[in-house]
Image (cartoon, grey):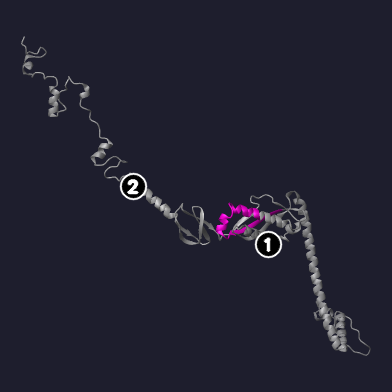
Amino acid sequence: MDAGKNPWGSGASDSTSAPDPAPGDGAEQGDAQGKDDGPRNPWKGGEEQPPARRSASIDDIFRSRGGRRPGGSGPNRPDLGRMALPLAAALLFGGLAASSVHVLSEGEQGLVTTLGRYEGTVGPGFSLTLPWPLQQVTVRKTAEIAQMSFPAKGGETMLLTRDQFMVNLAWQLRWKVRDLRAFTFAAQDPETVLRRLGEAQMRAAVAEMQFDAVWDGTGQGNLQDRVRQRLQAVLDAYGLGVAVEGVEVVRADPPARLADAFRRVSDVREEARKDQNTARKFAEQTLTKAEVETAEFDKAYAEYKAAPGVTRRRMYYDTMEKVLGNNQKVVVGAGVNVTLPAPPARAAAASEPAKKP
């Protein structure tokens, strides 16, 4: 047997086939020639096999275009980190500038404080101050008239009158700010102080009046004026900076448990008031008539004093004319021929033509 003869193949094939390459020669030759489809080297492990082909990722696409994936700081995209500081500075500057400019409308006033301390008062229009928190401006409508109701949440407010009766009184207080500085710093809660002072003055004023005057409304005008004047004097003494515009009584009722009894009394008083009005009207008419008759008598007496005979004769003729004006009988003396006119009824009957049957 020849040494070069392949025992697995034919002699022709063995003689023409090249000798097997040594281990590692095929891989080195394939790498040198750059061929990936050469014969597989049975002597190398699987870890050295060429990697499998994969599809392009989003990073490869943006890298091939010269940029980077969204959200990154690529060469064609501005850096948000570098813009954050100027943007924050611009917002801060705008906020400070806005807190320094103030535009007040008509009827408004602004209280300016520097670090909580009073600095001044600005009126309607355009004004500039230091930015917050160095200076702060508190705006209030000082020309607007506010209204405060008593009691605040409804219900009953029992006040004692001079004649020891209880009256359920509801009223309103109209006020406005006269001095903004005094109103802000004179009291911690000026509206609460105003409410308590108003209640005290109304209670004191009702205690000086009779129940009927408060209940039927005859003394409510005096009560309102008294409360307004006294409350304004007390507010000026406290230096609260408030002007009282008016006091108005809305309701004056007896206690709820006595409402039926007082309602009956009210009905009786209404009837008595109507009778009084009727009697007063009759008295005025009678007095007017008497004054007219008195004036006529005085005039006639003055004429009588000037000419007694003539006046007496004229008065006689006037009296007889009034007495005999509606009399159908005529009395004449003897020897006098008088042609009497026909009575109105007979004359009308005679003037009508006779009706045929």
Residue at point 62% right, 53% down?
193
* Quadrant of the rendering where the C terminus is positioned: bottom right
Q: Is residue 149 left or right of residue 287?
A: left
Coordinates of residue 4 in the picture (x, y in percent)? 6, 13
Q: Disc 2 marks which residue?
A: 83
Q: Is residue 67 left or right of residue 133?
A: left
Give the farthest residue toward the bottom. 335
Element carrying mark 2: helix
Q: Is residue 187 magenta?
A: yes
Of residues 80 and 97, which is closer to you in this image? 97
Coordinates of residue 115 in the picture (x, y in percent)? 49, 52
Residues drawn in magenta: 168-197
Q: Is residue 176 magenta?
A: yes
Coordinates of residue 13 in the picture (x, y in percent)? 8, 17
Residue at point 69% right, 61% down?
226
Of residues 179 and 352, which is closer to you in this image? 179
Q: Looking at numbered disc 1 in the image, what kind of residue is underneath it?
A: Asp
Kindly identify which numbered label has been placed on residue 225.
Answer: 1
Q: Is residue 276 left or right of residue 223?
A: right
